[in-house]
Image (cartoon, rainbow, N blue to C red):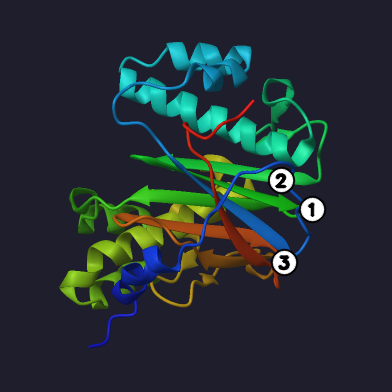
Amino acid sequence: MRCAVCPRLLLRIPLICYEMIAGGMVLPSDEIHIWLIPLPDNGQYPENLARHLSIDESARARRFMFDRDRARFVVAHGCLRRILATYTDQAPAAIAISVATKGKPFLAHHPDLRFNLSHSGSWALVGIAQGRELGVDIEHINPARSTDNIAERFFAAGEVRELHALPEQCRTNGFFNCWSRKEAYIKARGEGLAIPLGSFEVSLGDPAILRQAEDQDRWSMAPLQAPVGYAAALVAEGSGWTVRYFSDSPSTPGT
């Protein structure tokens, strides 16, 4: 049986062509920019990134019990602000990030510039779009989490059947393809836990498809290139958009 899940994972790293952050960014309405950010494993972070955070973000960082978790939060949110600064021509610390009623962040002074942040393990992912809602998700592929019990509890019935039909060696990747696509859709909607994971379906292989959602005609879905050992997905309003990849890192010079 041909597996439509695994081969794509093997192609991800050679296909990535990230462009380093440099100066002001121009974002056409038919493009979505995806930024990959490596997160520290040693519990350390550059102080300049910590200075980018808001008062609330700094307070959240201090509440982490473990240094590694604190450092990853600071780097993810500090780099997010540095990235947003390249699109808004503002200082990173001056960017006003507000939160909608159900928890989705947005830019109060740049309402047409939409963004979404996801992080898992040693990587964070940021999606940026102009005039269209979007959601991104990245997941560390951990076989211990890809159990039948979890799938049967959270996946739609059609997704469970598709997962069980995969060859054994492809099921872990299929599980995390499904999980990342479902999370990306929920994040694009911005309604949080009000949308049960089992209330809609996505495909587990290629192509990435949103199925049986109440508003499926509103959205398009795409798998994202990700580091080895990770799965990532994008859901955005409309169709006909293209994805461009960029990178930022804690060691990249910045304001």
Residue type for callout 2? Arg
In the drawing, what numbered circle is on residue 238? 3
Rendered-image quadrant of the N terminus: bottom left
Which of the marked residues, 1 or 3, is nearer the chain's N terminus? Answer: 1
Which of the marked residues, 2 or 3, is nearer the chain's N terminus? Answer: 2
On the image, numbered disc 2 is attached to which residue? 114
Q: Position of residue 77 (x, y in %)?
A: 54, 29
Q: Position of residue 206 (x, y in %)?
A: 43, 77
Q: Position of residue 129 (x, y in %)?
A: 70, 52
* Crowd class of label 2 (few under 14; some 14 to 19; many from 20; radius 10 Å): many
Residue 104 in view: no
Rendered-image quadrant of the C terminus: top right
Which of the marked residues, 1 or 2, is nearer the chain's N terminus? Answer: 2
In the drawing, what numbered circle is on residue 117? none
Tell me if label 1 and label 2 are in contact, CB under 8 Å.
yes
What whole-number distance in Å separates the C-alpha atoms at marks 1 and 3?
Answer: 10 Å
Q: Height in image: 4 above or below 234?
A: below
Q: Residue at x 60, y 29 (%)?
A: 254
Quadrant hosting residue 146? bottom left
Image check: 74 left or right of 23? left
Q: Nearer the viewer, residue 179 or 247?
A: 247
Residue type for callout 1? Gly
On the image, numbered disc 1 is attached to which residue? 131
* Crowd class of label 1 (few under 14; some 14 to 19; many from 20; radius 10 Å): some
What whole-number distance in Å separates the C-alpha atoms at marks 2 and 3?
Answer: 14 Å
Q: Residue at x 68, y 20 (%)?
A: 93
Q: Height in image: 228 above or below 101?
A: below
Q: Nearer the viewer, residue 187 or 63?
A: 63
